[in-house]
Amino acid sequence: GAGVSQSPRYKVTKRGQDVALRCDPISGHVSLYWYRQALGQGPEFLTYFNYEAQQDKSGLPNDRFSAERPEGSISTLTIQRTEQRDSAMYRCASSLWENQPQHFGDGTRLSIL
Amino acid sequence: KNEVEQSPQNLTAQEGEFITINCSYSVGISALHWLQQHPGGGIVSLFMLSSGKKKHGRLIATINIQEKHSSLHITASHPRDSAVYICAVSSGGGADGLTFGKGTHLIIQP
């Protein structure tokens, strides 16, 4: 299909390892958003891009979290030195431009042992 | 930072009932979104609105900018409407990431 694609769907890793989560937005969508959703909670904003430019990273919890979108399409969210509290569903969304309906991917379920 | 409050947190109703879910926010916004999250976890955008009212099938969303309040209505509710309904707001202009309410868990019994 032509929806937002995230990979991997599930990631289990040991505490202290680095992880990279990938998001492939809908073709032609300029804006790309990353959110995190803990079990039983609502999503919370992490960061977003317009094209390759990171517009707002105020939601990234600390400097272990970073994101890039080097060619203005696929984005990678990287978490260094993972901790158990990083366990959550990480969701990506894209939209044609800012202030437009957002289309969500199915998410990556991250579990840190 | 915008505070988004939803009510009720949980709602159980009988099939056919008229459902209302409320959302209020604390700071001016560029748009308000209503989202639906199914038990399988996927999130679908239902509405995005910045003024007035929108209707899609049995769903109606309204917003009152002056009162910083929005409602989502479901007419002739059906068990397949059972899901978590989430209100979210965006400020736009470089701060377009969504701020989410905690969601309303709706169960429609046959």
Image (cartoon, coloured by chain):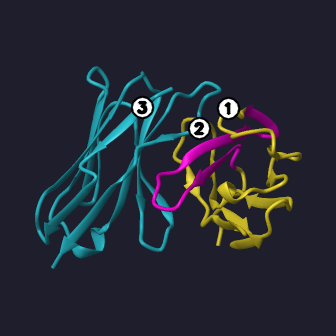
Chain colours: A yellow, B cyan
Work out which quarter of the rendered image holds the N terminus of chain A and state it.
Answer: bottom right
Amino acid type for the residue under numbered disc 1: Ser
Vertical comparison of B89 with B61: above or below = above
Range of magenta residues: A29-55
Between circles 2 and 3, the one closer to the viewer is 3
Left/right of residue A49 with respect to residue B92 in the rendered view: right
Left/right of residue B69 with respect to residue B37 in the rendered view: left
Vertical comparison of A6 with B85: above or below = below
Q: Which residue is mark 1?
A: A58
Left/right of residue B19 with respect to residue A29 in the rendered view: left
Q: Which residue is mark 3?
A: B3
Residue at mark 2 to residue at mark 3: CA–CA distance? 14 Å
Closer to us: A10 or A73:
A10
**Name of the residue lying farthest toward the right:** A70
Residue at mark 1 to residue at mark 2: CA–CA distance? 10 Å
Q: How many marks?
A: 3
Q: Which residue is mark 2?
A: B97
